[in-house]
Amino acid sequence: VIHIKMVTPRGIVEKSCQVPRMSTGPDIHHFIMGSEGTLGVVTEVTIKIRPVPEYQKYGSVVFPNFERGVACLREVAKQ
C-alpha cells in the first residue's frame, strides 16, 4: 500500500504518505486497513504491484548422513 485516503467520523479527509521501508514506529496503513471501518471509511487506495517472475529456480544438496552435512557447512562457514 502506497497511499490511503479515508473519511473519518468527523468528516475529515485524511491522506497518508509513503514512508521509507525501514522507518521506525508503527505503520499507519496497518491501523487504517485493520480498523474494519471503525476509524473511518476508506475511499481510495493506491497499491504498488510487482511483476511475477517467469520462473523460479531452486536447488538442494543431499548428504549421505547428518555428520557429513554438518562437516560441509563448517567448511563453508570457514570460507
Image (cartoon, rainbow, N blue to C red):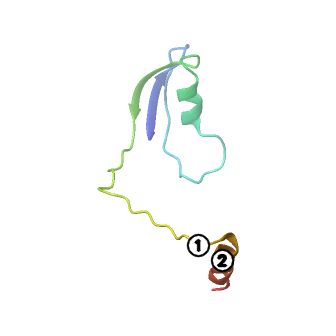
Q: In percent of the image, x 64 and y 40: which residue is there?
A: 26
* Label 1 sits on residue: 63
- Against 45, residue 26 (above or below) is below
* Label 2 sits on residue: 68
- Against 62, residue 47 (above or below) is above
Kind of residue at badge 1 = Phe
Residue at the front extreme of this rendering: 64
Where is residue 67 shown, x and y percent of the image? Answer: 70, 74
Q: Dot 1: within a 10 Å radius of its alpha carbon, few (fewer than 14), some, or many (20 or more) residues?
A: few
- Against 5, residue 78 (above or below) is below
- Against 4, residue 53 (above or below) is below
Residue at the bottom extreme of this rendering: 79
Q: Earlier in the sequence, mark 1 or mark 2?
A: 1
Q: Quadrant of residue 76?
A: bottom right
Where is residue 1 shown, x and y percent of the image? Answer: 45, 39
Kind of residue at badge 2 = Arg
Secondary structure of the residue carrying numbered label 2? helix
Query: Answer yes or no: do the residues labelled 1 and 2 have beta carbons within 8 Å?
Result: yes
Q: Choose between 48 and 64: the one closer to the eye.
A: 64
Distance (Cα) linking label 1 and label 2: 6 Å
Where is residue 22 shown, x and y percent of the image? Answer: 58, 54
Q: In percent of the image, x 68 and y 70: which residue is there?
A: 66
Q: In percent of the image, x 53 and y 18: which residue is there?
A: 40
Is residue 72 left or right of 60 when viewed as pictured?
right
Q: Quadrant of residue 49?
A: top left
